[in-house]
Image (tube, grey):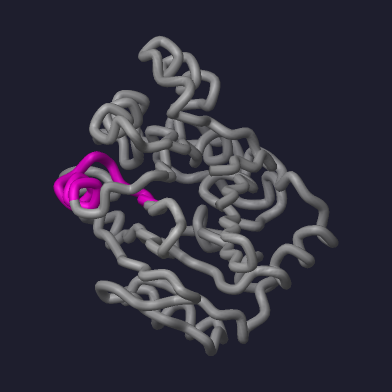
Amino acid sequence: MKIRLLRHATIVVDWGDVSILVDPMLAEQESLDPIGNAANTSRIPMLPLPLDDAALQQLIASVDGVFVTHTHRDHWDARASELIPKETPMVCQPPDLDKITGEGFSNLITIVEQERWHGFDVTRTGGQHGTGEIGARMGPVSGFVFKAAGQPTLYIAGDTVWAPEFEAALNEHQPDVIVLNAGAAQFLVGDPITMTADEVIRVAHALPNAKVIAVHMDTINHCLLTREMLTAAVAEAGLSERVLVPQDGETIAV
């Protein structure tokens, strides 16, 4: 299994001849207005994609499906909707079915609990995209667990803080590899709505045999935890060999 970070939460996962694109935010650098009510007003995405348009089109054409954990614009944006062919197999959570079909996509699977997909048992997990009133207003989010014989169990957690739904998924599935959306995204009021450095470290301690891959940083203006900050915290905790913080374009082989 190979996991390639494109940017933010947009990753490509390859298992031999099966490949998926997850949470495509494909907008050009600084082409979108910033997230409002945040500590700064930098336009987003703050970084470019690590591939040119031709390579991006080739990548899109090569994947077997696209998985969308939720449809906030930093996980599913207008350019992704424009560039991805409408017949591409898409997998999403039930609340997002109408939005994605409304954009013309015709080959959708919504996972309520579990589905068989290209030889994998794919389980949808819950999460909390923040706490209290803000978490409720952020709407439903999902993660996906991939299991197949002879493969490490992969948990793509999606936008969640440490919450009962997330902890239950860790305990039930005991994943070998966990992709966490870090960044400690935060508004001017309220607590972080994605994983903080302490939460990333907590995950690593909870599953001492798992490899943790932390993404979702340096791209959106309300993500206050940078890769540099998280890398330093992980090193201080003595977890640098198990908690990986990839750069855009980097591929991690598991």
- Location of residue 198 in the rendering, given as x and y in whole percent from the top left corner: 30, 24
Observer-nearest of 21 and 105: 21
Q: Is residue 15 left or right of residue 233?
A: right
Observer-nearest of 110 and 204: 204
> Looking at the image, which residue sits at the far front?
150
- Location of residue 215 in the rendering, given as x and y in whole percent from the top left corner: 50, 39
Observer-nearest of 117 and 128: 117
Residue depicted at x 64% and y 67%: 17
- Location of residue 18 in the rendering, given as x and y in whole percent from the top left corner: 59, 67
The magenta region covers 156-171
Quadrant in the rendering for residue 34 = top right
Q: Is residue 165 magenta?
A: yes
Observer-nearest of 132 and 228: 228
Residue depicted at x 50% and y 57%: 75
125 to 7, vertically: above or below: below
Q: Is residue 135 left or right of residue 243?
A: left
Q: Is residue 232 left or right of residue 14?
A: left
Residue depicted at x 73% and y 63%: 59
- Location of residue 45 in the rendering, given as x and y in whole percent from the top left corner: 62, 45
Quadrant in the rendering for residue 201 = top left
Q: Is residue 229 magenta?
A: no
> Looking at the image, which residue sits at the far top?
236
- The reply to whether residue 189 is visible in this rendering is no
